[in-house]
Image: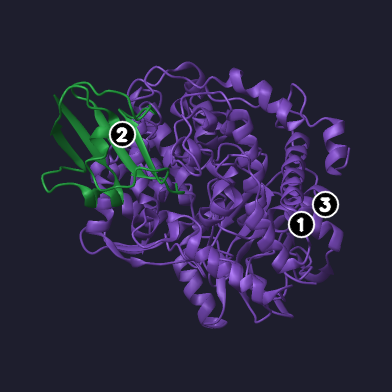
Chain colours: A green, B purple
Amino acid sequence: MMIYVKLIANYREALPPQAINGVVEMDVPDGTTVYDAISKFDIPLDDTSVIVLNGLTVDMNTRLVEGDMVTAFSAIAGG
Amino acid sequence: MYGWHLRILRVNLTTKKVTQEDVDPKIARDYLGGRGWAIHYLYKEMNPMADALSPENILIFATGPLTATPAPTGNRYMVVTKSPLTGALAHSNSGGEFPTWMKRTGFDMFIFEGKSSEPVYLFVNEDQVEVRSAAHVWGKDVHETTDILKGETSTEARVACIGQAGENLALMAAIMNDKHRAAARSGVGAVMGSKNLKAVVAMGNKNPALYKPDEMRALSVDTSKNVGADVKKGSNMRIYGTSYVPQVTNTLGILPTRNFLQGTFEGVNNIDGDALKNQYLIRHTPCYRCPLSCGRLTEVPDGKYKGKGEGPEYETISSLGTGCGVSNLAALVKANYLCNEFGMDTITTGMTIAAAMEMYEKGYISEEIIGMPLKFGDHDAMIEMIKKMAYREGFGNDLAQGSYRLAEKYGHPEIAVTTRKQEFPGYDPRGSQGMGLLYATSNKGASHMEGDVAYEEVFGVPVKENPLMTEGKPELVKHFEDSFALMDSSGLCVFVAIRYAFSKDRMILPQRLAEMMNLSTGAGYTPEEALKAAERVYNLERMFLLKAGSVEDTLPHRMLHEPLPDGPAKGKVVELDKMLPEFYKLRGWDEKGVPTKEKLIELGLPN
């Protein structure tokens, strides 16, 4: 199934060249979780990262469905 | 005494009399400094019912016990006064260099009373204090004024001043320092303008004596190196400043778009941090002694938006950009420069224009009244409106009153997205429930800097909270409000101080912050005492608000009754009634939001 991963700001360095505006499309097997998808990228998978599914706070073991977007960014004070 | 000078400079602008006063060490300790000292004096000396633009209002510049010390980001000051925009308390924070230079005059605070009969500026070089004519800079913008006053005083001096917006009493006027930094919110620049005070020029060599200078330097070095990922090379704040945030809030569906009609913006990639970095960034411009360096000098090199200056920051992108539906980056950058030069808060400026755009599109305000079409996304019309606001020309006079008065005048108060008549910053609380409670209860009207729980709900600092949940938010908001009162009183910038005010278990104990204040002042605060002092400050601010006649803690129509139509928070409104009673209980306030007598006694406040 096709899903999307979006990385924001400094995490974009971990994206492959075909990414557009920080978004890359990926073909993943059924049963792939949020964790499985995001762990393919060289970003920290601890509390220094914020990872959301379709913009929502979810468990990292949540299974993805076709068209889902996983987004990650560095946890940082700002705004 | 250490850390604090314990000296105040009082300037009566009516009589031009200048006096120096000592500060009672007990008051100094109980109210921390900065924002805390300022509310103590404001509450004691001013009638909260006074007209904010009358000579009765008092304008206070206040540094903290960590300003002009080795503490990283110890470069802030607060401007505290009664707001002409909200009728409530104003306290606006700024960094750069001026606050450090101000404290080096040997005074912690400047208090301005009365009103000058003609334009003046204050020059302070330690004990040389002069109220000088400002006739030659009246009518000039912030950049020109700063250059002229430095030229006629000293290149060693630093300048805080108002631009044309403050002179003309536009209610979103800011006080700018070092040209590009702003004590922006709540119309503090209009108060300065109402007193005919164009500028404050400060210099000196009186750094505060430190209680334990060697230990303080060691803790400061450790803090710079080790407190959080934020200060490290390659962090978002170092690369982008706050301009990376639109992608984050857009992902969560809380990016204010077209006056909060939507929570996501289709043009976000055109105006985000990468676009700004790739097209217009020249270099970083840190505040004094800041390991973070989030400020950025930018330039639009040619074309009709040609210009050079600092920013824009996130809050400008979410107001003048997405708030107005504008995706032309060069025009947005130019609009930001204009606000800095005229001396205007970009949040209230942008969101007031956004409200006018919505009212135009709905047919509530005609093209004839405005003088031109004013559709969402029309960046040239937006720029014209900024100029008209600064000078209060034509329709600009309506805009210069802010969105609440604008919407009310044209018969549609439901359009204004404000609390206490102050415009919302860049986090739609329908998708960030804690922010909703914060905006509703903030003593100064809608402001993220009153206690920015978006750090947890949005940014995951110190831990990630689900922004759509209401559970636990009353406690979180209270902790953040108190902690922000502490940081604002200390003289630190929240961007770094947040890392040493909070622990990961969310039970906030400012261990490192209290230690830093003790090494500076010798006051011997326990973390609990420092936090209790911050709670004292917050409750006294509440009392000022109540005496000023503004009591209701609520949210505008759109937030309570119009569900978000798009994005991850689609269908949500703010569930304020689920949070407010618990918040009052945790605060020790009654069901109307009034501190109980027991709470006032506990905090040692007048009761």
Judged left or right of residue B159, residue B274 is left
N-terminal of the two: label 3 or label 2? Answer: 3
**Residue beneath disc 1:** B525
Residue B50: % across, % down: 76, 43
What secondary structure is marked by label 3? helix
N-terminal of the two: label 1 or label 3? Answer: 3
Judged left or right of residue B20, residue B223 is left
Q: Is residue B419 above or below residue B31?
A: above
Q: Is residue B310 visible?
A: yes
What number is the disc on residue B376?
A: 2
The residue nearer to you, when weighing B354 against B472, is B472
What secondary structure is marked by label 2? loop
Distance from the alpha carbon under mark 3 to that under mark 2: 45 Å
Q: Which quadrant would residue A55 be assigned to in this image? A: top left
| Proximity of marks 3 and 2: CB atoms separated by less than 8 Å | no
Residue beneath the point at 31% across and 34% down: B376
Residue beneath the point at 14% across and 33% down: A26
Distance from the alpha carbon under mark 1 to that under mark 3: 27 Å
Q: Amino acid at mark 3?
A: Glu
Q: Amino acid at mark 1?
A: Tyr
**Chain assignment, label 2:** B
